[in-house]
Image (tube, rainbow, N blue to C red):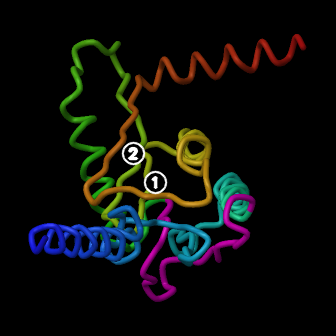
Amino acid sequence: MKKRIFALIFITISIFLLFSCGNNNGNNNEKDGDVIFSASVEVSIVKPSGENAEELNGALELLADAILAKTNKRPMIVDDNYFNLEHEIAVGETSRDVSAKAMDKLLDVIDDADDEALEENDRYIGYAIYSNGKSVAIVWSDELLIGDAIDYFTESFVVSDSLKLDAGYIKTQITSRAEYLEAMKQTDTEAAWL
């Protein structure tokens, strides 16, 4: 009888501990710092100081609107003279460490690409998305890719009411500049016939 009572107490305590410690399914996102944005986590979009390119500003407005649609909170769009916030989406070559790391990783990928596959006077271009766990950076190696980089981020990562990326997450995309320009020319030609 004592063994049954002891077993019942042990099972009760075990169940209590399991539910009290694992209340959030073992996912301490906000404490671990791996939530970039959510309904409960404020995020700001940071652009390089003095950057007033119409294409960049338009893309940032669309990104902010996409986050608003998912979280019911519209992020502020600030330049990198604005003080560092805990959760940021750094777009372009900002003064933030996450931007510098993203650009370094992108340039490493471009440097490692096989230049012998390129035609004369061609080069690789690309963009990268990199996270330090609390913030994310979107960078590109050529201004041709501003819209593509931000559109890719918006379509691939702003898909629910929160974004979680582990520290060190990296996604890069590179292509030949000549191939990119040819594809853009083809797209423009096809659009003219519609």
For residue 91, side relative to residue 184 (left or right): left
Q: Residues within 10 Å of mark 2 (few under 14, many from 20)?
A: many
Any magenta on residue 81? yes
Q: Magenta span covers which residues?
A: 69-91
Q: Which mark is on residue 56?
A: none
- The residue sitting at 27% across, 44% down in the picture is 107
Provide the residue designation for mark 2: 128
- The residue sitting at 50% across, 61% down in the picture is 91
Looking at the image, the residue that sits furthest to the front is: 1
| Mark 2: amino acid | Ala
Count of numbered tags: 2
The quarter of the displayed image where residue 3 is located: bottom left
Q: Which mark is on residue 138?
A: 1
- The residue sitting at 67% across, 65% down in the picture is 71
The quarter of the displayed image where residue 20 is located: bottom left
In-front residue for pair 133/83? 133
